[in-house]
Image (tube, rainbow, N blue to C red):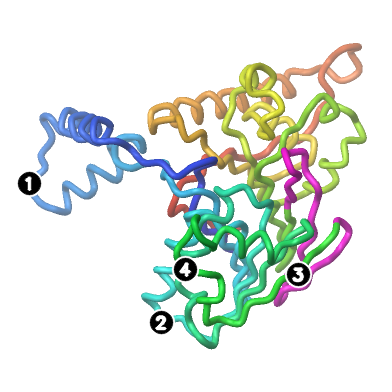
């Protein structure tokens, strides 16, 4: 499967401001001092291979949208934040018509549906769009956001054939060659995570989910939902101290909890998304470094554990890799 991240920021779209862009340029020029950069090729190589990510790029500012390819002509899209507008523009550049889009919505907080009015394929006759979700009233919710005084163009302006499917945990939804299941998550108003199984691989999309004290129980149901997944896309805008402090009950999780749950579920790769809108590129980069250090430390602790010694950590698997997602990231699993 191929996974394309079109929007990875949480709560509200954001972008680097003028001062942050200026500092990136300064940092790049400082790093270039003394380098032989005469040709365009040398400059491009320097940018790609020498500059760190926070200087040469950005973690992105579009709200959640993930496209999962399974080899089927039907599109599988997780959430419709502002990132889905970018995906729509890319598809129209390819003159994509007569396509079927399955859009799975985790919930209806605005950052997860605000891109729908700007999804260009929805205005093209011949396309089909199926909205999926675990909540009751999907159609009415989506229609409401496209009414005056909130939006000037009504839902009926869409020319594509649009339908709505409501599901419950335990359902198996077949889309092309994929089987998709949903899991109820702890979040204000409830959110749903989705597991996509296809081609012998599994991707779990789990955003806007808080894992409280019950997450440490041996029989925590979430572990079975993510078990043996090749990729777990996990909501973690907070540090551990933030998630159990002032931001407790906000419906989100931490990087530490992500690593812990991925380890217990024997997940291959952990992808962090839903970055805090208040975090700069430097902040997210530092958060990423801290997460990788924590993962390395827990792996070391398990290797050093002596089996049979009371109180020693039990040997267990850990995610092979932790990835911090950014707008435009594509990966194959």
Mark yes or no: residue 80 visible. yes
**Residue that carries the numbered disc 1 in the rendered image:** 38
Q: Is residue 201 above or below residue 51?
A: below
Q: Nearer the viewer, mark 3 or mark 4?
A: 4
Residue at figure coordinates x 36%, y 75% from the top left: 93
On whether residue 177 falls in the magenta region, the answer is yes
**Residue that carries the numbered disc 4 in the rendered image:** 153
**Rounded to the nearest whole Å, what is the CA distance between mark 1 and mark 4?**
51 Å
**Residue that carries the numbered disc 3 in the rendered image:** 165
Q: Is residue 272 above or below residue 180?
A: above
Residue at figure coordinates x 48%, y 60% from the top left: 151
**Rounded to the nearest whole Å, what is the CA distance between mark 1 and mark 2?**
39 Å
**Residue that carries the numbered disc 2 in the rendered image:** 95
Of the numbered discs 2 and 4, the one sitting upstream in the chain is 2
Residue 108 in the image, given as x and y percentages of width and height: 65, 52
Q: Nearer the viewer, mark 3 or mark 1?
A: 3
């Amino acid at each position: 499967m191929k996974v394309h991240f079109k929007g990875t920021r949480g709560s509200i779209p954001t972008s680097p401001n003028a001062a942050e862009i200026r500092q990136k340029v300064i940092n790049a020029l400082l790093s270039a001092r003394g380098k032989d950069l005469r040709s365009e090729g040398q400059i491009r190589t320097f940018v790609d291979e020498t500059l760190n990510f926070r200087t040469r790029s950005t973690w992105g500012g579009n709200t959640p949208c993930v496209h999962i390819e399974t080899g089927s002509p039907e599109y599988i899209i997780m959430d419709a934040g502002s990132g889905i507008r970018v995906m729509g523009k890319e598809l129209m550049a390819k003159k994509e018509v007569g396509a079927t889009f399955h859009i799975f919505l985790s919930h209806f907080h605005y950052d997860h549906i605000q891109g729908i009015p700007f999804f260009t394929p929805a205005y093209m006759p011949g396309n089909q769009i199926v909205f999926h979700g675990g909540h009751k009233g999907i159609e009415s919710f989506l229609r409401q956001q496209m009414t005056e005084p909130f939006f000037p163009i009504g839902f009926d302006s869409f020319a594509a054939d649009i339908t709505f499917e409501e599901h419950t945990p335990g359902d198996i939804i077949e889309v092309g060659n994929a089987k998709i299941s949903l899991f109820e998550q702890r979040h204000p108003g409830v959110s749903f995570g989705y597991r996509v199984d296809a081609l012998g691989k599994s991707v779990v999309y789990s955003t806007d989910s808080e894992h409280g004290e019950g997450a440490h129980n041996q029989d925590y149901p979430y572990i079975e939902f993510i078990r043996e997944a090749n990729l777990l896309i996990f909501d973690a805008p907070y540090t551990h101290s933030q998630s159990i402090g002032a931001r407790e009950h906000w419906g989100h999780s931490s990087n530490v909890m992500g690593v812990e749950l991925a380890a217990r579920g024997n997940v291959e790769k952990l992808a962090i998304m839903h970055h805090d809108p208040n975090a700069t590129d430097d902040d997210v980069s530092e958060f990423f470094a801290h997460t990788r250090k924590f993962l390395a430390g827990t792996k070391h602790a398990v290797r050093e554990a002596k089996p049979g010694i009371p109180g020693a950590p039990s040997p267990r698997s850990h995610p092979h890799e932790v990835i911090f997602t950014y707008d435009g990231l594509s990966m194959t699993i």
